Image (cartoon, rainbow, N blue to C red):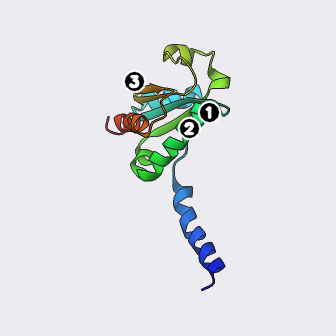
Amino acid sequence: MHRRDFLMLTAAVSLPPLAARAQFIDYTPERLETAMANGERIILDFYAPWCGTCNRQQRVMEQLRAANPAYDANLTLIHVDWDTYRHTDLVARHNVPRRSTIIAFKGARELARTVAGTSVAEIQALFDAALNA
């Protein structure tokens, strides 16, 4: 087998599991209210695409999700665009001080949060709190 054929075959076999992974969904009031009303385990991520801390958090969350498929299988992952929603009732109601805030919920009950936390251990503890709720 030629090296190029091997690489193409390897890439083709590797892509389907990545495509099957759950993704963060964009926040809408209806999506969050429905998830909370259904008692879902939620990760609510307040981020801005230009925020360096947020980008580091995204990389850590991707790493954790790749290592533990239970996160994608059992958690509702919601991105809240800080630039769009920072002056809304959502931010006031949940006492969100800034972008780069990640909150874990079981239904409407807050389980844990991190503000500007970027360590793997801190974000994993947040995901585990939601997963084990």
Q: Amino acid at mark 3?
A: Glu
Tell whether 27 sits left or right of 38: right
Seen at 63% across and 84% down, the residue is 2
Q: Which of disc 2 and disc 3 is earlier in sequence?
A: 2
Residue 27 visible (yes or no): no
Q: Residues within 10 Å of mark 2 (few under 14, many from 20)?
A: some
Tell whether 14 sits left or right of 74: right
Seen at 51% across and 60% down, the residue is 17
Q: Are marks 2 and 1 in contact (CB under 8 Å)?
A: yes
Name the outermost residue toward the left: 132
The x, y position of residue 49, in whole percent, is: 66, 34
The x, y position of residue 132, in whole percent, is: 31, 38
**Label disc, if present, on residue 110 of the rendered structure:** 3
Frontmost of labels 3 and 2 is 2
Tell whether 65 sits left or right of 83: left
Point out the image quarter for the N terminus: bottom right
State the residue in front, 36 or 57: 57
In 3D space, how far apart are the residues under numbered discs 1 and 3 (Cα atoms)? 25 Å
Q: Which residue is mark 1?
A: 52
Point out the image quarter for the C terminus: top left
Q: Amino acid at mark 2?
A: Arg
Q: Which residue is mark 2?
A: 56
Q: Is residue 2 above or below residue 66?
A: below
